[in-house]
Amino acid sequence: MNEDKESVVCPGVYAGFVSDGLIAWYRENKRDLPWRNTGDPYKIWISEIILQQTRVDQGLDYYSRFVSRFPDVFELAGAEEDEVLKYWQGLGYYSRARNLHASAKMIVEEYNGKFPEKYEDILHLKGVGEYTAAAIISFAWNRPYPTVDGNVFRFLSRLLAIEVPIDTGTGKKLFTETAGILMDEKQPGLFNQAMMEFGALQCVPVSPDCNNCPFVFKCMAYIARSVNLLPVKQGKTKVEDRYLYYFHIKQGGETYLEKRKGKGVWYNLYEFPVIESGSPLEFMELRMHPRFQEIFGDIKEPKFRLVLENKKHILSHRRLFASFYEVTVDADFLCQTLSGASDSLIRIPENTIDTYPTHRLMEIYLEGSFYS
Ligand code: SF4
């Protein structure tokens, strides 16, 4: 396919036909989702952040629990970050929860708790990009900002046979402009919802239901038999392998957790002390690692038991391989060697571990009945 090829059809020709068709289809087929029954920008914001990287069916329970515990921006702003992360646990991409929390504080401090109504101000909130800002402002205040998510890219690329890659600046600009031209200006919020829902339920990635599609006779990709070739993507991000070696230290009824530092997606979540590497490490190599010395000092006769080996876990840009060692240590010795190893290390009763927000790999280990 020619990567620079725009549609041969001017989208303006399709404007009324497409918006009427989408809205009629939406009224018949839409899913009843809780965030569609509210005009509260706070709740719409929460739902959109959850749905950024989570499927609707998975996000539903999280949304209900989250808005039930934090029903408004004041409740969210006043909560401890650990509690917010705990409510997010299992959803992944934890920067979303941290950004929600930080933005809630900002709304309280800078806007007296009133959700900003200007597009530029909404865009200024942490974790809010152009799509999310457009969704909030069009759903809450019915303002004409097009929402172009993956479903919309797919539908428009097929309807108009647009071959410009969707993961390029040119592609994003073109598709946003196209959605704006097609938009029903009297009901932009409804139009946006309808187009996204159509892409999610009807014009799906594999085997779309073209035979029952209201646009089948005008769909350029269907006519050209290129439905399966659209949308076009330029390329995938390089995925890096990382090897994680966790130490579940057992000291009577207690264990140790560390709050993760740095800028990664698991920032501020709790996990067992860990050694990370860009390549696999044998146990002897682990013992020689400077971090091992930092954690265990010159421990003489440690009892290490490999409980879980090379558990694979995929993140958007990383392939993780995690191993978990259970380590039984002498009480006095542990106190001496671990003190000062890390200012984020905490010693806790094992039966309280569930109260700390953690990430999926730790959950897998803890759920695996290795833990008692
Ligand atoms: S005809 Fe098929 S490909 Fe074209 S818009 Fe409808 S469902 Fe999508």
Image (spheres, helix red, strand yellow):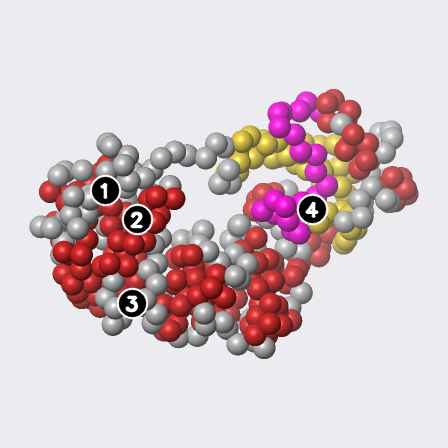
| Discs 3, 4 touching: Cβ within 8 Å | no
Residue shown at the point (37%, 41%) measured from the top left: 168
In the image, which residues are magenta? Answer: 262-283
Q: Relative to residue 287, is residue 176 depicted above or below?
A: below
Secondary structure of residue under mark 3: helix
Q: Which is nearer the N-term, disc 1 or disc 4?
A: 1
Left or right of 164: which side holds 65?
right
Tell me the kind of residue under disc 2.
Leu
Judge: label 4 CB < 8 Å from ligand 1.
no
Earlier along the polypeptide chain: callout 2 or callout 1? 1
Q: Secondary structure at mark 1?
A: loop
The amino acid pointed to by label 1 is Glu
* Magenta highlight on residue 275: yes
* Residue on which the image places disc 4: 261
43 part of magenta stretch: no
How would you rate the neighbour count of disc 1 (Cα within 10 Å): few for under 14, some for 14-19, many for 20 or more? some
Residue 222 x, y percent position in the rendering: 14, 43
Mark 3 sits on what residue?
188
Under mark 4, the amino acid is Lys
Mark 2 or 4, nearer chain start: 2
Which amino acid lies under the numbered mark 3 shown in the image of this protein?
Pro
Q: Classify mark 4: helix, strand or loop.
A: loop
How far from the left and from the top, in percent, is residue 346?
78, 51
Residue behind mark 1: 6
Q: Which one is nearer the viewer's eye here, 297 or 264?
A: 264
Q: Nearer the viewer, residue 102 or 321?
A: 102
**Which mark identifies residue 174?**
2
> Which is more toward the observer, 165 or 236?
165
Number of the front mark, 1 or 3: 1
* Ligand 1 lies under 8 Å from the Cβ of mark 2: no
Q: Give whichever of 80, 333 is nearer the camera.
A: 80
